[in-house]
């Protein structure tokens, strides 16, 4: 039996939410943070995608041979894991600058707004790139 093995590493972003896995347009299951799932498929070409609410991944085409296992990693958007930490860190630093050094409000909220704009891009125009499949080369 051929199979597709999908690994979702532990990430801070979307930590509490599951991604729905679609194989050939059919919902096959959900994968949680840090989980590994194996889906049995027939040999041949398959189209895989994942969704979380209105966001998701682009279709990922693979070909599975008889008795072969294809290993994939499912990741959030580029720098998504670090974005949350950077946003919170910049916000905390800016609050310190505001109350201790009495900086101008415009100067203080530049970085958090920049991080927020990057995230909002992936929530709107880049919603089909919110999740990404990579071939796992272990």
Image: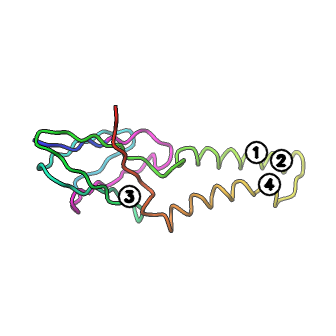
Q: Which mark is residue 57?
A: 3
Q: Residue at x 51, y 61 (%)?
A: 122
Contact (Cβ within 8 Å) of mark 2 with mark 1 = yes
Q: Real-space Cα distance between discs 4 and 3?
A: 34 Å
Q: Earlier in the sequence, mark 3 or mark 1?
A: 3
Q: Earlier in the sequence, mark 4 or mark 3?
A: 3
Q: Which residues are magenta?
A: 7-27
Q: Earlier in the sequence, mark 1 or mark 4?
A: 1
Q: Real-space Cα distance between discs 1 and 4?
A: 9 Å
Count neighbours of disc 4 (C-alpha within 10 A) and say few if under 14, some if 14 to 19, many if 20 or more: some
Q: Nearer the viewer, mark 2 or mark 3?
A: 3
**93 is higher (above) or lower (below) than 127:** above
Q: Which mark is residue 93?
A: 1
| Residue 111 pos. (x, y %) | 72, 54
Count neighbours of disc 2 (C-alpha within 10 A) and say few if under 14, some if 14 to 19, many if 20 or more: some
Q: Secondary structure at mark 4?
A: helix
Quarter occupied by the C terminus: top left
Count neighbours of disc 1 (C-alpha within 10 A) and say few if under 14, some if 14 to 19, many if 20 or more: some
* Nearer-the-camera pick, 70 or 103: 70
Q: Which mark is residue 18?
A: none
| Residue 75 pos. (x, y %) | 42, 47
Residue on which the image places disc 2 = 97
Residue 17 lies in the magenta-colored region? yes
| Residue 41 pos. (x, y %) | 14, 49
Residue on which the image places disc 4 = 108
Farthest residue, direction bottom = 125
């Amino acid at each position: 039996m051929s199979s597709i093995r999908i690994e979702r590493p532990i990430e801070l972003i979307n930590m509490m939410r599951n991604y729905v896995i679609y194989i050939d347009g059919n919902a096959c299951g959900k994968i949680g943070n840090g989980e590994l799932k194996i889906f049995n498929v027939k040999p041949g070409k398959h189209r895989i995608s994942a969704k979380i609410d209105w966001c998701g991944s682009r279709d990922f085409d693979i070909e599975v041979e008889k008795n072969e296992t294809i290993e994939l990693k499912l990741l959030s958007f580029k720098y998504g894991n670090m974005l949350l930490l950077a946003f919170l860190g910049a916000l905390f630093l800016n609050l310190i600058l505001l109350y201790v050094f009495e900086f101008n409000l415009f100067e203080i909220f530049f970085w958090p707004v920049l991080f927020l704009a990057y995230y909002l891009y992936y929530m709107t125009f880049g919603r089909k790139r919110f999740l990404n499949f990579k071939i796992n080369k272990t």
